[in-house]
Image (spheres, rainbow, N blue to C red):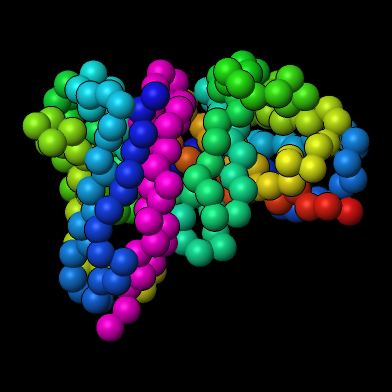
Amino acid sequence: DIQMTQSPSSLSASVGDRVTITCRASQSISNYLNWYQQKPGKAPKLLIYVASSLQSGVPSRFSGSGSGADFTLTISRLQPEDFATYYCQQSYSAPPWTFGQGTKVEIK
Amino acid sequence: QVQLQESGPGLVKPSETLSLTCTVSGGSISGSNWSWLRQPPGKGLEWIGYIYKNGGGTNYSPSLKSRVTISEDTSKNQISLKLRSVTAADTAVYYCARVEEMATIVAWGQGTLVTVSS
């Protein structure tokens, strides 16, 4: 199984900060990497697919990069509504696909 | 816009079978791929299984494969999940989801909490 490791597990940041979350796969997964945002009590929401494509309707302050085994989600200027937990998910191998353990972004 | 709604018992006894239904509105389930996922309280997301479009078969998590069945009922526009011989470790919020190319989950149900307890 492909293991996905996110770092950090949590972070504290202020509105307006630039935030970077990393996701590392246990093997190369090309660009088969998606990012989701989850707020408390809600289902996750797709932000980025195939590593760097922005889902329709998602603000442009969100961006994704990377290929192979190392990936990054960046929020350029953190907004109050961005405080949430973020998950990466690989889709390289046959299903079922695996998620990272999540990164909780909290208010500083 | 497709909407998904999970339904089923919120409490299941240990060793029994967890049965959930996902009713899809705003579009036909035919021609799309569907999945069930779960999230234990305070923990991360786990993919349970996947049903390919147009009767293309299923694929399950190796850790759950011996206990899981995912099926579809096109006449009712529903996707179903059955998880047998449950234990407390199966307590979680269960989500159904529509999956597009590159295993991208583009639509989620609101989720339903299932507690396994006697």
| Residue A27 visible in the current orientation | no
- In percent of width and height, residue A101 lies at 59, 50
The overriding secondary structure of the stretch rendered in magenta is strand
**Which quadrant, please, contains the N terminus of chain B?**
top left
Q: Which residue is drawn at 32% across and 79% down?
A: B117
- In-image side of B34 versus B76 (left or right): right
Q: Is residue A64 left or right of residue B7?
A: right
How many numbered marks appear?
Answer: 0
Can residue B94 be seen here? yes
Residue name at image x 20 percent, y 57 percent: B19
Q: Give the range drawn in magenta.
A: B91-118
Given residues B19 and A33, the one toward you in this image is: B19
Residue B115 painted magenta? yes
Name which residue lies at 46% across and 55% down.
B39
Residue A32 at x, y = what percent? 53, 23
Q: Is residue B97 above or below residue A93?
A: below
- Residue in the picture at 53% in, 49% down: A42
- Where B41 falls versus A92 (above or below)? below
Q: In which quarter of the image is residue A63?
A: top right
B28 displayed left or right of A96? left
Could you tell me residue B55's position as x and y percent? 14, 25
Q: Quadrant of the C terminus of chain B?
A: bottom left
- Residue A10 screen position, x and y as percent: 75, 53
**Would residue B22 appear left or right of B106 to someone viewing this image?**
left
Q: Is B19 colored magenta in this rendering?
A: no
Q: Which residue lies furthest to the left in this view?
A: B75
